[in-house]
Image (spheres, rainbow, N blue to C red):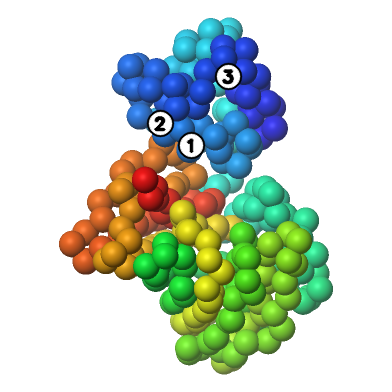
Amino acid sequence: MEEFAARLRQAIADRGLTLAGLSHRLGGHGVSLSAATLSYWARGLRRPEGLSSLAAVRALEDILRVPQGSLLSCAEREAPQRRGRVGAAPLPVADLWPTGDAAITRLIERIGVPYEGRRTVSVHERMWIDAAGAEQRVRVTSVLEATKDGIDRFLVMRDDIEAVPELRMVSGGRVGRVCTDRRGRVLVGEVWLDQPLNRGQRTAVEYELDIGADGRRTVDCTRRFANPVHQYVLEVAFDPTAVPVRCYQITPDGPDPVVPIGAAHAARLIVLDGRAGTFGLRWEWT
C-alpha cells in the first residue's frame, strides 16, 4: 500500500496540483473521483481496487504525466485479493485502522479476546446527529457467526473518540471490560454473549454507544469489516435544523457517489455481499 501512496503523492506534488483541481481534471476524462478519495489514496488510508478505481488510476497517469503503468502496477500489486472470499483470514488490524492500529492492538491484547474466531454476517447501524452537527449516539444490531468452537465474546471497536462513549447492551449479551487509549483516540469494548457459539452457529446482538456532547461537528460514520459481510445498512439521522449540503458513500473501492438526504433528514447506505474493508457515509456541512 505504501508504494502506490508514495508515488501518487510525489506525482501530485511534481505537477503542483491541488486535490480539488485533480478531481476536476479527472472529470474531464469522464472519471468521477472526489478530492476526499484522492486524499485517502495519497495517505495510504484506502486502496484503489475495483474496476472503476483502477480505470481512475489510468486516467491519473495521463493527467500527472507519469510513465504508463507506473501507478497502475502498484495499485494492482497491492490490492489484497483475499478480501472477496468468505472463509479467508480476517484483514489485519493495520489494514482496517491504518492510523490507529498500534493503539487498537494494545487494547485488544489488554482485554485478551482473540481478534479472530467470529465474523459479522449483517449489521444495521443508526447514528443520530444533533443540532450542533455533533454525534449523539449510535445503535447497532449485528448478526454474528462463529468460525471456530467456543466463541463467548466479541469486540466493539471505535476510533476518533474525543470523550469516552458509554457502551450499553440492549440485547444478546452483557458488557465486560472497556479500555480506551485517549492519546490514540480509540476504544475497545468486550461483550460477553448470552451463550457460547460453536463453529457455524449464529446469534444476534444489539448495543448502543452514547457519545455525549464533545462539541465536535461530525463529518462521517464508518464501519470496518475484517471479513466479507452479507448485509450492512447504515442510517444517519440529522437534526432538521442542521442538514449537510452533500452526502457521499464510502466503500473500499471508491469513487464516492453522492447519497441523497431524504425528506426525513436522513441518509442511508445499503451494502449487499460487501467485501472486507471500510464502508460508511461522509458529508459536507458547507
Tag shown at residue 84: none
Inspect the image, locate mark 3, and give the three-letter code of the amino acid beneath it.
Ile
SS category of the residue bearing label 3: helix
Inspect the image, locate mark 2, and give the three-letter code of the amino acid beneath it.
Leu
Q: Position of residue 103 (x, y in %)?
A: 76, 60
Disc 2 marks which residue?
33
Q: Is residue 97 above or below residue 167?
A: above
Disc 3 marks which residue?
12
Inspect the image, locate mark 1, and give the three-letter code of the amino acid beneath it.
Thr
SS category of the residue bearing label 1: helix
Q: Nearer the viewer, residue 248 or 31?
A: 248
Query: Which quadrant is home to the C terminus?
Result: top left
Q: Position of residue 186 (x, y in %)?
A: 68, 64
Sooner in the amino-acid sequence: mark 2 or mark 3: 3
Q: Are marks 2 and 3 in contact (CB under 8 Å)?
A: no
The residues bearing labels 1 and 3 have C-alpha atoms spaced at a distance of: 14 Å
Q: Nearer the viewer, residue 266 or 2?
A: 266
Q: Is residue 238 visible?
A: yes
The answer to whether residue 158 is left or right of residue 244 is: right
Q: Are marks 1 and 2 in contact (CB under 8 Å)?
A: yes
Q: Residue furthest left?
A: 263
The answer to whether residue 107 is left or right of residue 206 is: right
